[in-house]
Image (cartoon, rainbow, N blue to C red):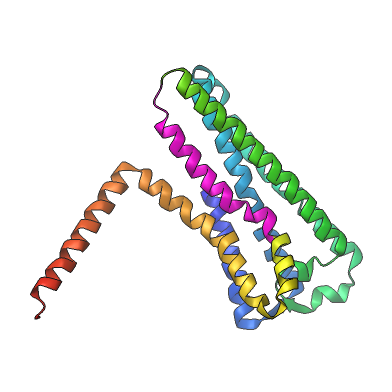
Amino acid sequence: MVMNDMIQLTTAVLINVLAYIFYTINVSLCCFLVLIASFTTSNTPLNLAGMAVERYIAICNPLQHAQICTVRRTHVLIGLIWIFSTIPIVPDLFVIVATENLSFFYSTVYCYRDNVFRHPYLVEKRNISNMIYLSFVWLTLFYTYFRIMFAAKATGADARKARNTILLHGLQLFLCMFTYIGPLLESVLVGLFPMLINDLRYTFYIFIYILPRFISPIVYGLRDQMFCAYLKKSLVCFIQKEQNKSKIQPS
């Protein structure tokens, strides 16, 4: 998940930097970058679903966890996640190759997915596949985490850590939900406010690409006891330093 988010952020930032510097770039390059960004973006919610299933097995079937969640099966699951992430995206490439003239790939456009994959069929296919994947991920999360809560209460175990995990993944998934509904919502808002198209695209870029990847390492870092202890110590030192500055300043 960390490697996937690193690739996604690098590609997304590169697309935006190129768009702001050159405004238009070669279609072939834009197509390559958009495919990578779209693939890694749709990968994140599926990673969260896989993590939810692993937590479900660890809490509800602790005796079988070591046998089920082996390294080999983990690699297989990661491979399946990457395959399912490519299923909605790779056909888009074949469609534009079959429907667009060769000159289109040598032209320049503002690097945006709808400007490259502009066939109406692709837009409808993307919306339908996004709804299917969103439903699957939400059902997986709800089922596994409600089972986790019931198992923790039934065994008399401390459900606090399970609740924290539920809240964390729920927040992550809520933000990643924009991955699936963002394009549809953006097209609606752009149609209503065409004069704000650049502002809307930048806002969706922050919420869809940046924010979910920013919160995840921060929250996981705060849950690490050693990191949290150093962070608290740094904050205390900073507060004391600011207080000392205010005391020595002349009134």
Q: Is residue 78 left or right of residue 216?
A: right
Q: At 50% from the left edge and 28% from the top edge, which residue is drawn?
A: 149
Q: Quadrant of residue 84?
A: top right
Relative to 55, say whether 64 is above or below. above
The residues colored magenta run 157-182
Relative image position of residue 221 (x, y in whole percent): 38, 48
Question: In the rendered image, is residue 57 in sight?
Answer: yes
Viewer-side residue, 22 vs 188 = 188
Q: At 91% from the left edge and 65% from the top edge, which residue is drawn?
A: 99
Viewer-side residue, 186 vs 22 = 186
Q: Is residue 47 left or right of residue 91?
A: left
Q: Is residue 157 left or right of residue 141?
A: left
Question: In the rendered image, is residue 70 in sight?
Answer: no
135 within the magenta span = no
Q: Quadrant of residue 157?
A: top left
164 within the magenta span = yes
Relative to 232, say whether 141 is above or below. above
Relative image position of residue 115 (x, y in whole percent): 77, 71
Relative to 36, say whether 84 is above or below. above
Q: At 60% from the left edge and 39% from the top edge, which residue is drawn?
A: 49
Relative image position of residue 203 (x, y in whole percent): 59, 69
Q: Quadrant of residue 14?
A: bottom right
Q: At 86% from the left edge and 63% from the top edge, which residue is drawn?
A: 120
